[in-house]
Structure formats: structure tokens, C-alpha cells
Amino acid sequence: AQSVTQLGSHVSVSEGALVLLRCNYSSSVPPYLFWYVQYPNQGLQLLLKYTSAATLVKGINGFEAEFKKSETSFHLTKPSAHMSDAAEYFCAVTLSTGNQFYFGTGTSLTVIP
Amino acid sequence: ETGVTQSPTHLIKTRGQQVTLRCSSQSGHNTVSWYQQALGQGPQFIFQYYREEENGRGNFPPRFSGLQFPNYSSELNVNALELDDSALYLCASKAGGLWDYNEQFFGPGTRLTVL
């Protein structure tokens, strides 16, 4: 079975501080991993994706994530938080042989001025 | 280019009723997926349609059913509504089929409340 676990349902950082949102996956086959962001009353927007190419993936809005197979992790980072980064973030996994996405329970990011 | 649109934006139903939610996929996209997002949870996969046929289904009962039309728009139907069906229902579309890992684009969702 495939799944993702997001550690920390709520994360607060100061504006300008490092953002680190954690995601660990479980997959019986090489996974495809994604990070999505959801603003209030909106759908999901893709931040970045890992599809077995480079392990360090750069996404939009200054976010990046590193695929670490040995740690089964795909943590999301941003060097300097901005007020506009406050949102809900979801990690998701899909198989190399299928399209069903499995989402984590989400991490709510608060940015403190 | 028009993105994924969903209608209605909000809906209130009572237990036992039936509901139909609609999704228009992004131009050029022939695959549509539906997700249920309960409050405080991540989206849960309901099913996916490709070329008007269901080609994947999550752990949802048969009272959740769908259709995809020749123009690739889609409907989600839920019969015999239960209180736990209250959620945000998201539609996502992408180009290609089962073996294409193209980006899914999500619509804004339909907020269903069951009383």
C-alpha cells in the first residue's frame, strides 16, 4: 500500500525564517511524489513534483524538496518565509504504474510578521 | 485558456437525498479525477475517468458514481446522502491517460453540506 505521512499538522514560522514541512512516504515501488498548496476556499495548486529524475526538485514560489530514498522522505523547504506562504500544504504520492494520488493530512503553515 | 471549473460552488442537501456535481475539464484534458476532502483532511481519491470510462476507483461505496461526456466534462453523483458525505469535492483534470504523468489541475471545488 502507498501512503504519505506529514509530521506536524500546524507549523508556525517568522517572516524571513526557514520553512520546513515534513513528508515521509511508504511505497512498495518507486514513487512519484508531489507537493500541493491550498489557499482558503481554493483548489490545489502544484508546487513541485519528483518523477525519478533529479533528487533535488525546485518548484514555484521559491520552494524546493529533496527526495531521500534512504529516509523515505520528501521534505519541503523554503529559505525565507513570506506572508503570502500562509496556506495548507499537502504531500501526495502516486505509483509508477497508476494514477491514484494518495494525499497526506496536510500541514497548515502560519507566517508570523 | 480556461482552467478546471466546478458547479455549484456550494450545496446544501438533507440526508437521503441525491446530488449531482459537475466539472468542466481544462481545454485539451481528457482525464478527470474526483476527490473528497473532509474538513481538516487531505483529499481522498474517489475515481478517475478516461475516455468516458472509469479506470480507477478508491475506497468509496457504489452510491458514488460518475460520468464523463464526449467533451471530457464530468459528473459526480452521490445517492442516499449521509451526514459524513459533507465535504469539499474536488475535480482534477489532466492530459493523457493512465500512463501519462502529466500534471493534474484542480478546480476550486464544490462544498457539500448534508443536514
Image (cartoon, rainbow, N blue to C red):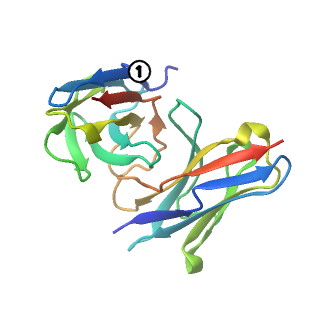
Q: Provide residue B104's location: percent of width, then percent of height.
A: 46, 41
Name which residue lies at 46% across and 35% down: B106
Residue A79 place in picture, x, y as percent? 81, 55
Instruction: Name the side, left or right, on which A8 lies relative to B22.
Output: right
At 50% from the left and 34% from the top, the residue drawn is: A43
Instruction: State whether residue B69 appears in this view.
Output: no
Residue A59 image offset from top left, x and y in percent: 67, 49
- Left or right: B19, with A46 as reference point: left
Q: Residue furthest bottom?
A: A70
Identify the secondary structure beneath mark 1. Answer: loop
For the C terminus of chain A, the image quarter is top right
Q: Position of residue A111 (x, y in %)?
A: 75, 45
Q: Is residue B35 above or below residue A95?
A: above
* Res. B100 visible in picture: yes
Depth check: B29 or A107 in front? A107
Q: What amino acid is at disc 1?
A: Thr
Label 1 belongs to which residue? B9
- Above or below — where is A33 with respect to A37? below
Quarter of the image containing the N terminus of chain A? bottom left
Q: Is residue A66 left or right of residue A84?
A: left
B3 up-or-down from A99: above or below: above
The residue that appears at 34% across and 40% down in the rendered structure is: B33
Foreground residue, A49 or A77?
A77
Q: Quadrant of residue A60?
A: top right
Crowding at dot 1, Cα within 10 Å, few <14 / some 14-19 / many 20+, comes out as: some
